Image: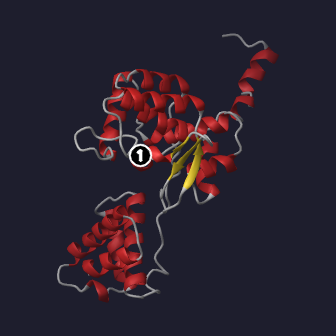
Amino acid sequence: MLPSLLQYLKLKAYSPSTNKTYTNEVAQLLQSLNNTPADDLTTDQIKQYLLHCYEDLKLTENTLHSRINALKFYYEQVLKKEKNFWDIPRPKKPLQLPKLLNEQELGKLFNSLTNKKHKAMLFAAYSAGLRVSELAALKITDIDSGRMQLFIQRAKGKKDRYVNLSPVRLDILRSYIKNTGPGPKEYLFESEQTGTAYPTRTIQQISSNAKQKAGIRKEVGIHSLRHSFATHLLDKGVDIRYIKDLLGHFNIKTTERYLHVSKRQLMNIVSPLDDLWKKENIDW
């Protein structure tokens, strides 16, 4: 089962992370079946298994969605059993707002770093709204100072895009390249030991260490710099359609969630208590 699933995923050119996720999720099903052939499961049996995942294993809604997607792919794409998942309901996902840092917290975060390479990494992540995988994959040749653009190549969904390159960011990157050790040769942020791109886990740890050193208690990570970038652009009045393109979103609905955390419109709303306080001369 798993070899045929992995083969089909590779033929469809899915990303290594998706391949790993789908095979792991299907493997969980196989472990629970004992000697029952997975290919012969009915829709009702799959429902019972997913109910077991929710009630007994206490899986979250997001994990259940991932497991359903993996099973759906196997049964419909590999086995061609298109009717298996028609009647299987999906759990409702909670509405989770993006976690972000305000400008004062960002200042503390950046100032907590003394290593120029690490500081340039976090500057780049925030100033362009980059995913950590996109940050790690940046190459020196992706910098186009003539057009003041940064080329993001084969990002999520294998989608290329350009983001604007601000003068401040360009100066920072030039200074970093010129004054940091031997300087990078191919990737913008290279490991001095291996000469290859920084691992994403290392970048995440750098961000976590900086947050701790800055005394920031919010549960935020490197991806929060991307959330902060989008929300702060909305606060400054940038059209959401442009933000969608800068972030590389396929659907505008993904970008619209930042409307829930932008303070631009909320700043114009006056609390009814404030009006009442002024009109009725209420004492405290």
Label 1 crowd (10 A; few <14 / some 14-19 / many >=20): many
Residue appearing at x 38%, y 26% in the figure:
179
Residue at (53, 33) in percent of width and height: 170
What is the secondary structure assignment of the residue under circle 1?
A: helix
The image shows residue 122 at horizontal and vertical percentages of 43, 34
The furthest residue to the left: 35
In the depicted structure, whether residue 112 falls above or below residue 92: above
- Percent of width and height locating residue 211: 38, 29
Residue 181: x, y in percent? Answer: 31, 29
Q: Is residue 217 visible?
A: no
How many numbered dots are placed on residues in this image? 1
Residue 232 visible somewhere in the drawing:
yes
User: Which residue appears at 31% of the width and 68% of the height?
Assistant: 25
Question: Observer-nearest residue: 243 or 118?
Answer: 118
- Seen at 66% across and 10% down, the residue is 284
In terms of image quadrants, where is residue 53?
bottom left
Specify whether 277 is left or right of 29: right
Among the 4 quarters of the image, the one containing residue 115: top left
Residue 151 drawn above or below residue 228: below
Residue in the foreground of this view, choosing between 281 and 42: 42
Name the image quarter holding the N terminus. bottom left
Tag 1: amino acid: Val
* Residue 279 to residue 116: above or below: above
Looking at the image, the residue that sits furthest to the top is 283
Residue 238 vs residue 53: left or right?
right
Which residue was labeled with disc 1?
132
